[in-house]
Image: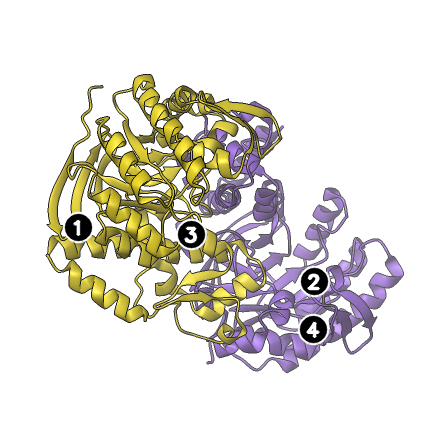
Chain colours: A yellow, B purple
């Protein structure tokens, strides 16, 4: 108990930062990309695969784990680290985002949300207090405030939702019991710079040990995303980590770090893998295409992941063509490696004060 | 070229034998259980998993690989070892069994079989010469004679099929071009001891470097299987390995070795895994059952596989309940480990002249 969550800023270059966030399960070396283990498993990979990938922080979803197997069951079995056998840092979201995107919303009021399970249609209620209690049962190192993530272009609704999100952030802080978990506040406000500014100022005033930027990558343009990041970054305190929720392409990582982001997560690498797609050297590779049937080359020349060190495009194409599970596993390994390695390269570049050149070369190689 | 396939018998105890069969891709230490990689992948596992399991011999299916991706493509990419990145010994079957069980048979005649692909309904023809040519393209270390595997109780039909199987065995020997592959002959004859005797005598006379017993585990009783094994074992030469095709429960392994068998293969371990079942200490465990929801114990106490060393039954039950791929992977690891480890223990017991006691203790523990 009494764990303090400190963030050491090691280097800054422009808005970009390299740091270390200390948690009970080890250091998070930022900038960092967090693979998503929605149901307490990063889809198709063992924890041994994740270790081999040098994954650092793993995300799990409160909504899914609350429904199945249930947070109390996870607590009884020793918490999420023990349950899924990931002994590094874990972050859980608040459940809010999935309630709005997956659950059938029955009612939102000032107190919380009543929703229908996407699994069996049963009715459930989440409030800030329930979200924190569930996340305390799950036992991640970083937990998130319960927030509302509305459609980004509806001004009136975003104003209303922001009032709730802010009130809920305060209630989450009050509800929190465990001192070995860091609770992050979430900035909302849609695509509206003034709402984002207002939200960043309010959330920053509450003294969270870290801050998240929510409600992005949900339909807005990249320019809008970048604008919002710039607005928020100017306000959030520099001595706390900043987490851009649910974002992840390689380009998003570089663009986010350029605008002060430290932590990213996204299902994209494993979801692409299940859809037969891989991050290529420039764009994406749809490995199911006939042109790869006899291609002896690795997915990406020079890539150091297990998949690229070991298998040909022809073999990967065969696996996905005949619907073998190993195809998803091998593509997931490559896609996660790509983002994890990119984050490590970004970090090294910042530490060596050459990130501006790194970013420039990165975008040129993608043109 | 000019590779000789020698079988060194290291120890015998009763009918049970421990030996080493030398192949261009390494030694096969018998008795051995071969995991099945039907489509050039042992379902849900990487080659790294198979190495960690100390797998020795891997089987792949000619019928499936001929249809997809095609044997010529595999040859172009360097053969099966290079294609699937398994650098130990590989065995391919002849395609015969799948033609009869999966393909829609259009015509069987003295020359070969015309069948319909289970993938797209296209028509294909396999003959002894085509089967050997395909297996030479695939490039396994052990290849199999093209045979017919009929319904085991129809006497008249088994007599007819046996005539074909024997003629085809001779044609396979003539057709074979590569000297770096060992061609095994296959004994057929249904449940009829006199046909099996006749078949074993004929096949043994042809001088194959190894022999297989086909057409078992296809509907006959265990007593019938054991009787046939005893008949055949008395005839097949002792200085060549004996392969019981498509058989393996743990009990079958012990019973087979007691009757002179050296090599086993079966899809059971990985198929059970996909059906949420695991080999338990006594019988099978259906891990989906509610009783395991909060069970912190490993699948099998004392089991040294990655799954049992790492995860609880509760976690495995969660994975299969929410249909996560990792469930199949972890159960496959455990099930394959169980048979691979049992084969290693059997071998060690024979080498130490204590297999009779080992077998007795094994069956007592299962009562």
Front position among marks 4 and 3: 3
Q: Is residue A56 left or right of residue A45?
A: left
Q: Residue at x 79, y 53 (%)?
A: B191
Q: For mark 2, name the chain.
A: B
Circle 4 residue = B169
In depth, the one of B309 and B329 nearer the eye is B329
Residue at image point 35% right, 37% down: A188
Q: Eyeballing the image, is A360 above or below A179?
A: below
Depicted A156 relative to depicted B229: above or below: above
Q: Residues within 10 Å of mark 2 (few under 14, many from 20)?
A: some
- Foreground mark, 2 or 1? 1
Total numbered badges shown on the rendered structure: 4
Q: Quadrant of the C terminus of chain A?
A: bottom left
Crowd rating for badge 1 (residues with CA inside 10 Å; few <14, some 14–19, many 20+): some
* Disc 3 with disc 1 on a shared chain: yes
Q: Which residue is mark 2?
A: B98
Q: Is residue B48 above or below residue B315?
A: below
Of marks 3 and 1, the one in the foreground: 1
Q: Earlier in the sequence, mark 2 or mark 4?
A: 2
Q: Position of residue B13 (x, y in %)?
A: 53, 46
What distance separates the C-alpha of mark 2 from that of mark 3? 38 Å
**Dot 3: few (<14), some (14–19), or many (≥20) neighbours within 10 Å?**
some
Q: Is residue B163 left or right of residue B50?
A: right
- Quick check: marks 2 and 4 in contact, CB under 8 Å? no
Which of the two discs, 1 and 4, sits closer to the camera?
Answer: 1
Q: Nearer the viewer, mark 2 or mark 3?
A: 3
Q: Residue furthest front?
A: A156
Cα separation, mark 2 vs mark 4, equals 18 Å
- Residue B284 in picture, x, y percent from top left: 60, 34
Q: State how far apart marks 1 and 4 are (Cα).
A: 74 Å
Instruction: Identify residue for label 1.
Output: A15
């Amino acid at each position: 108990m009494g764990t303090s969550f400190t963030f050491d800023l090691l280097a800054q270059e422009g808005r970009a930062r390299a740091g270390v966030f200390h948690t009970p399960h080890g250091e998070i070396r930022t900038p960092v990309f967090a693979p998503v283990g929605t149901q307490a498993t990063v889809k198709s990979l063992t924890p041994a695969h994740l270790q081999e990938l040098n994954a650092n922080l793993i995300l799990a979803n409160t909504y899914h784990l609350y429904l199945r197997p249930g947070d109390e069951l996870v607590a009884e079995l020793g918490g999420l680290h023990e349950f899924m056998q990931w002994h590094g840092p874990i972050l859980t979201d608040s459940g809010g985002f999935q309630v709005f995107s997956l659950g059938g919303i029955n009612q939102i009021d000032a107190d919380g949300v009543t929703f229908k399970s996407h699994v069996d249609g049963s009715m459930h209620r989440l409030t800030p207090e329930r979200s924190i209690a569930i996340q305390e049962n799950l036992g991640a190192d970083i937990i998130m405030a319960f927030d509302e993530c509305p459609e980004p272009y509806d001004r009136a609704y975003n104003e209303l939702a922001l009032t709730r999100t802010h009130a809920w952030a305060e209630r989450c802080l009050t509800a929190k019991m465990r001192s070995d978990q860091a609770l992050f506040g979430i900035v909302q406000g849609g695509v509206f710079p003034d709402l984002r500014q207002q939200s960043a100022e309010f959330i920053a005033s509450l003294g969270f040990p870290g801050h998240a930027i929510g409600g992005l990558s949900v339909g807005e343009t990249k320019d809008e995303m970048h604008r919002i990041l710039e607005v928020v970054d100017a306000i959030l305190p520099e001595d706390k980590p900043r987490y851009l929720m649910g974002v992840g392409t390689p380009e998003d990582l570089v663009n986010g770090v350029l605008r002060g982001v430290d932590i990213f997560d996204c299902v994209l690498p494993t979801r692409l893998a299940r859809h037969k797609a891989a991050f290529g050297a420039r764009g994406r590779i749809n490995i199911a295409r006939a042109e790869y049937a006899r291609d002896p080359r690795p997915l990406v020349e020079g890539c150091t992941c297990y998949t690229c060190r070991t298998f040909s495009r022809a073999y990967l194409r065969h696996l996905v063509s005949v619907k073998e599970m190993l195809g998803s596993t091998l593509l997931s390994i490559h896609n996660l490696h790509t983002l994890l390695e990119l984050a490590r390269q970004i970090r090294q570049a910042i530490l060596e004060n050459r990130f501006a050149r790194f970013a420039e070369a990165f975008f040129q190689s993608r043109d």
